[in-house]
Amino acid sequence: MNETELQFRTAAFGGFQKQDVLTYLETSAREQAEKLSALQRELEEAKKGKAEAEEKASAEEKRLSTLEEENKRLAADLADREASLSKLSAERADLAAQVAGLTQEVKKLTPAAASYEAIKDRTAGIELEAHGRAQAIEQEAQAKVKKTKAEMECWFGKLQSAYSRLRADLDATITHASGELDRVNQSLEGISREFDAHDAALKALQETVETLSGPKAPQPLPLEEK
């Protein structure tokens, strides 16, 4: 407030006119009250925005926890599939050993079967049957292994895609929340500076009022000559 605005009309018998001073004080108080009310509304809106940002961050943390639990479940399922595949591989190796044993037995029986045509035919039939069974079992085991491998690759692809989406959503959420918090902090700092400025203005106004009402009143301006 400049020096011109502080000059009041003088009364007829010295001093300032009381109504001018009261009007000035009422106007100043009303303006300060309106500014304080506006600042209070801005502060409430900033607090509300901060609360909403914190609530959204909490929801995203819950979502992340749910996805992590799903990831653990899929990892356990994958471990079970790997155990099944290992078991199938062991069964295949056992069948291969049985085939090798049967082959060795056939080789041992072949010299004796040379004199006994019936035994030879029987041995050949057993060998062929065993070989056919071994091939059928091996083909079935290979089919199971291929199927299990394809399922594992499909699940792994889904798991990797879900993780990529989760990571992208989390990064976006963190970036948005960080921006919102920065904006709220800047708004609060601005409000704090506004309050400091208003405090200084009120202090200056109080000092002016004390000066006007104290024993050292300013010299009244001379009356205008008619």
Image (tube, grey):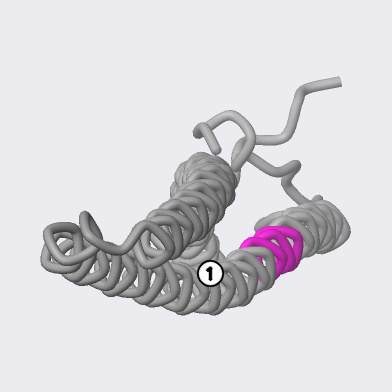
Q: How many residues crowd mark 1 within 10 Å: few (<14), some (14–19), many (20+)?
A: some
Front in this rendered view, residue 33 or 178: 178
From this view, report whether residue 171 is shown above or below residue 95.
Answer: above
Determine whether, in the image, residue 5 is placed left or right of residue 29: left
Q: Main secondary structure of the magenta part?
A: helix
Q: Where is residue 36 in the image (x, y as percent from the top left)?
A: 71, 62
Q: Position of residue 169 (x, y in %)?
A: 57, 45
Front in this rendered view, residue 41 or 124: 124
Q: In which quarter of the image is residue 222?
A: top right
| Residue appearing at x 72%, y 35% in the figure | 223
| Residue appearing at x 88%, y 59% in the figure | 19
Question: Can residue 35 be seen in the rendering of this structure?
Answer: yes
Determine whether, in the image, residue 179 is placed left or right of residue 92: right
Residue extending furthest top? 226
Question: Can residue 196 be seen in the rendering of this structure?
Answer: no
Q: Residue 84 magenta-drawn?
A: no
Please identify the quadrant where the N terminus is shown: top right
Front in this rendered view, residue 35 or 88: 88
| Residue appearing at x 70%, y 43% in the figure | 8
The residue that label 1 is drawn on is 74
Q: Where is residue 107 in the image (x, y as percent from the top left)?
A: 14, 59
Residue extending furthest front? 115
From this view, report whether residue 59 is shown above or below residue 128.
Answer: below
Q: Position of residue 226 (x, y in %)?
A: 86, 20
Determine whether, in the image, residue 197 is placed left or right of residue 98: right
Q: What stretch is highlighted in magenta?
A: 44-53
> Looking at numbered disc 1 in the image, what kind of residue is underneath it?
Leu
Q: In which quarter of the image is residue 15?
A: bottom right
